[in-house]
């Protein structure tokens, strides 16, 4: 056995019910190495790492640390073996300071000595090049600072093997660069680092080796220096596919929805949308880019009549009558009664767009149940619609009577998008419609959006993958901390340009008194 | 302590075995598990009986059955009690389906009963029963509805916690009824509740409780249809499953909450009406007899399905009657019958866990 192997997994299998999340997976990570675990959503990356971190227990297989077989039955066991995991969702106490969060839960025989702890924390930050004020409260922190706290928490406990679950999902490109620098410093120090990701360019720029998982199976490990994007994609997806998304020219292009100077605040009085103005034209796809939680949700909900606005107007140009109508502060029902055909695919599919415990037919009925004078439900038409959607969008479901929560993410999304499109909308808003979907389902969704665009629908697409936004959208609007920081042409922009726009607002906000909230 | 800690950690992380959610279970398997749980409950009760008393458990069970259905009178009694409990359970169900925790059934029943009793006292003798009874019915339904609307209004207006609110309203109702019981007692102030002679529900086919039972059967069918096939029932389900979804598709959530609580209260009012006019012919502060609370269990056990509720309410009443017979015959105090009922219900509720989950033991591994 090699001397410097920090952690080795052998034949790990884990099942949940009838779903095999990990099948017979073996891999190694050495000291002073950054290993990327690459795979699509649902390929079992997080499950695998959760077993190393003591969250789950494998059904079978062995784990070795420093060449010795170990049993990790709890996060405590994991720490004993110097393994620490930074989860995607932070587990911090908001009203505590960074230092308090870091030492929380540690037993110190000699009593509680904060200055001593802070000294140790500062030593760690200096060593690896973190930027952190140990006395800052969590609720005052940006997402990236919170992540720093989580990482230091793990280092403070003496972890030599660090696992980071999708660490860049919530970071701006600039913050990502900083994080990578820190991770490289840790590598120099001899730590073993595993990062879970599905972003190819990060894998290529950061890691030494890449382990690829596909549908719970281990496909192989390759040296980063000897591979390229195409090869990794093929390993990840199983076959070569072109990343080209079709984009037709915009036809028509008259203003369909014009948003004028809208603002809204949350309960604490923080501005979620700040003087936002833009227009969406018929027959185009307007992309919205931004860091998660910058006001995308509020913007769409404001248009859909779910968010109270402090000021501004949402003007709808009715293509039939040619009239202009203000949708501000109307309820969704009123908007529909005004003859505005607005379809909305929300981010929270099962919590908002659909009812998880109801079957496909009853979910179809959500939009149409109230039609007609009868006191009773008409299940015939929704049933027909359900059959049509299952058939046309190839939804795989045991039956129409299966509760939608039992369907996989991609199928859930097909059901939701299918229903929304069925109402032949004039405006279609979709928030993160491909999040958690495999590549095939994602393309089904892109095609559906394109179809709508061609038939003259004004499409608003909120996305997180800049590559997709640039390929799919006619125009891309960038939002940062509730403000529009720029609108660029999708045909001749670059990721860098959008990245700069995404962060621009942060800096501007901080100068103006630190209103930039972190969601 | 640390050992215990580690033990729990290991259980939680699955070192010993896993709890796995079942995808689906065939209906006969589910019922098999339920019947098995009753069987185990009876065995455990047997042990408890032998260790606490010197009784033969088999004999005890026979007494129990006799206590519930031993004579035609007892059987009718059983059905009448089941009907009332079922009525209250039906009443709570729409609210529960909406995830509005109406714990105020007790108070809503009493207010319904109070309305019925006041009609019987003030209008009795002045109107023929054919006119009086519909008025009584209407009055109790309206009164209980309004009583239930109070917490619903505060919920929609100020987002007040409905569980606490409905619970508190019970005490107000109990004291109100206690006041009027004393006021109307004969002689006044004695506390002996007055027998209400006018407006009693008619005897059908020689059975004085038959009409109660028929009314509740009709309500069961109506509520089943309402929840499953009506647009309003659908709205209730959507609001209960996800208020966000309801808002997203444009359901007026506040309106649905108010409307559903009005229905919930109205049905409790019917229970109060049946109790006062059909069963007791008098009003006391314990007329509702805890049914507002027992019904919560009936409704949950039946998973909010009105038809299953027939079974669960019958089961609960059967246990209550049987157990009280045991204490009576063997001169045990009533705690013993409560213990028996408690054990049986514990097993039945516990069986739901095995219907939803299965346990897979970890195979032995070295180093564990």
Image (cartoon, coloured by chain):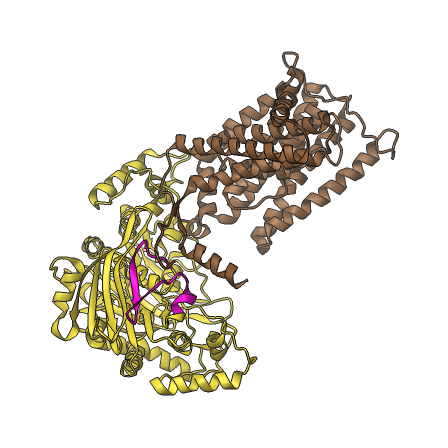
Chain colours: A yellow, B brown
Q: Is residue A222 visible?
A: yes
Q: Picture quarter containing residue A312?
A: bottom left
Magenta segment: A56-79
For the C terminus of chain A, give its image quadrant.
bottom left
The location of residue B178, given as percent across then percent down, is 78, 38
Q: Position of residue A77 (x, y in %)?
A: 41, 66
Residue B124 image position (x, y, % from top left): 76, 24
In the image, residue A296 sits, relative to residue A401, either above or below, namely below
- Of residue A96 and residue B144, the one placed in the foreground of this image is A96
Q: Nearer the viewer, residue A417 or A115?
A: A115
**For residue B312, which quarter of the picture?**
top right
Using the image as rendered, state which of residue A154 and residue B195 is in the foreground. A154
Q: Residue at x 23, y 65 (%)?
A: A27
Magenta segment: does it hold A60?
A: yes
Res. B79 image quadrant: top right
Q: Residue at x 57, y 46 (%)?
A: B101
Check if residue B166 falls in the magenta segment. Answer: no
In-image side of B127 versus A506 (left or right):
right
- Percent x, y of residue B141: 63, 33
Image position of B123 with respect to B348: above or below: above
Taking depth in this image into account, of A228 and A393 the one nearest to the observer is: A228
- Is A250 on the left or on the right of B294, as rendered? left
Residue at image point 57% right, 79% down? A111
A433 displayed left or right of A94: left
> Which residue is drawn at the image coordinates 14% and 60% (left, top)?
A246
Instruction: Name, please, the residue furthest toward the top.
Output: B205
């Amino acid at each position: 056995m090699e001397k410097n192997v920090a952690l080795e997994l052998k034949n790990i299998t884990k099942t949940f019910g009838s779903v095999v999340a990990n099948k017979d997976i073996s891999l190694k990570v050495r000291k002073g190495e950054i290993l990327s675990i690459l795979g699509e959503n649902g390929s079992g990356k997080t499950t695998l790492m959760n077993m190393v971190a003591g969250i789950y227990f494998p059904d079978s297989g062995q784990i070795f640390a420093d060449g010795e077989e170990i049993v990790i039955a709890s996060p405590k066991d994991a720490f004993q073996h110097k393994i620490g995991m930074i989860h995607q969702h932070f587990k911090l106490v908001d009203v505590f300071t960074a230092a308090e969060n870091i030492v929380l839960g540690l037993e110190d025989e000699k009593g509680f000595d904060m200055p001593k702890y802070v000294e140790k924390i500062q030593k760690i930050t200096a060593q690896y090049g973190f930027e952190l004020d140990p006395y800052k409260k969590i609720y005052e922190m940006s997402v990236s600072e919170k992540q720093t706290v989580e990482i230091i928490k793990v280092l403070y406990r003496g972890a030599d093997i660090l696992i980071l679950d999708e660490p860049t999902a919530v970071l701006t490109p600039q913050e990502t660069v900083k994080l990578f620098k820190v991770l490289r410093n840790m590598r120099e120090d001899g730590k073993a680092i595993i990062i879970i990701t599905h972003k190819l360019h990060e894998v290529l720029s950061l890691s030494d080796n890449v382990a690829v998982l596909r549908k719970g199976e281990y496909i192989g490990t390759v040296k980063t220096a000897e591979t390229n994007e195409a090869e990794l994609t093929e390993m990840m997806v199983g076959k070569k596919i072109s990343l080209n998304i079709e984009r037709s020219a915009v036809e028509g292009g008259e203003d369909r929805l014009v948003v004028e100077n809208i603002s809204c605040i949350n309960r604490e009085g923080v501005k979620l949308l700040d003087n936002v103005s833009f227009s969406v034209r018929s027959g185009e796809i307007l992309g919205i880019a931004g860091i998660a939680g910058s006001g995308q949700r509020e913007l769409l909900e404001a248009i859909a009549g779910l968010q109270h606005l402090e000021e501004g107007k949402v003007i709808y140009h009715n293509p039939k009558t040619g009239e202009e109508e203000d949708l501000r502060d109307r309820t969704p029902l009123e908007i529909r009664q005004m003859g505005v055909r607005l379809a909305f695919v929300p981010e929270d599919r099962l919590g908002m767009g659909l009812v998880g415990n109801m079957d496909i037919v009853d979910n179809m009925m959500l939009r149409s149940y109230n039609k007609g004078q009868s006191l009773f439900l008409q299940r015939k038409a929704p049933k027909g619609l359900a059959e049509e959607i299952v058939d046309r969008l190839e939804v795989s479901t045991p039956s129409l009577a299966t509760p939608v929560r039992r369907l996989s993410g991609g199928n859930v999304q097909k059901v939701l998008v299918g229903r929304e499109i069925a109402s032949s909308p004039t405006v279609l808003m979709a928030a993160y419609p491909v999040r958690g979907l495999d590549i095939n389902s994602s393309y089904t969704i892109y095609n559906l959006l394109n179809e709508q665009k061609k038939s003259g629908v004004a499409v608003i697409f909120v996305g997180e993958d800049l590559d997709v936004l640039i390929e799919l959208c006619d125009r891309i609007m960038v939002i940062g901390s509730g403000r529009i920081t720029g609108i660029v042409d999708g045909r001749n922009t670059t990721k860098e340009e959008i990245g700069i726009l995404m962060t621009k607002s942060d800096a501007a906000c901080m100068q103006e008194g630190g209103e930039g909230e972190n969601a | 302590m640390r050992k215990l800690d580690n033990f729990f950690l290991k259980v939680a992380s699955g070192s010993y075995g896993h709890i796995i959610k079942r995808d689906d279970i065939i209906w006969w398997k589910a019922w098999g598990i339920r019947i098995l749980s009753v069987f185990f409950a009876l065995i455990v009760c047997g042990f408890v009986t032998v260790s606490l008393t010197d009784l033969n458990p088999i004999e005890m069970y026979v007494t129990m059955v006799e206590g519930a259905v031993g004579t035609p009178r007892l059987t009718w009694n059983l059905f009448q009690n089941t009907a009332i409990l079922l009525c209250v359970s039906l009443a709570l169900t729409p609210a529960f389906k909406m995830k509005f925790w109406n714990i105020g059934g007790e108070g809503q029943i009493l207010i319904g009963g109070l309305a019925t009793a006041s009609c019987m006292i003030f209008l009795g003798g002045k109107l023929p029963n054919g006119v009086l009874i519909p008025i009584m019915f209407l009055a109790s339904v309206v009164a209980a509805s309004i009583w239930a609307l109070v917490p619903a209004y505060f919920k929609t207006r100020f987002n007040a916690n409905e569980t606490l609110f409905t619970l508190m309203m019970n005490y107000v109702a109990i004291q109100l009824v206690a006041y009027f019981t004393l006021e109307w007692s004969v002689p006044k102030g004695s506390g002996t509740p007055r027998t209400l002679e006018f407006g009693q529900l008619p005897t059908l086919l020689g059975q004085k409780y038959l009409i109660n039972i028929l009314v509740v059967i009709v309500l069961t069918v109506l509520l089943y249809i309402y929840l499953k096939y009506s647009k309003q029932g659908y709205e209730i389900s959507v609001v209960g499953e996800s208020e966000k979804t309801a808002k997203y598709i444009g359901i007026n959530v506040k309106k649905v909450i108010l409307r559903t609580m009005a229905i919930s209260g109205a049905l409790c009012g019917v229970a109060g009406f049946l109790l006062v006019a059909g069963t007791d012919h008098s009003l006391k502060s314990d007329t509702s007899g805890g049914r507002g609370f027992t019904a919560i269990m009936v409704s949950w056990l039946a998973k909010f399905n009105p038809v299953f509720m027939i079974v669960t309410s019958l089961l609960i009443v059967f246990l209550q009657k049987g157990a009280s017979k045991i204490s009576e015959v063997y001169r045990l105090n009533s705690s013993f019958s409560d213990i028996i009922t408690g054990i049986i219900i514990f097993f039945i509720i516990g069986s739901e866990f095995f219907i939803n989950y299965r346990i897979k033991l970890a195979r032995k591994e070295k180093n564990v």
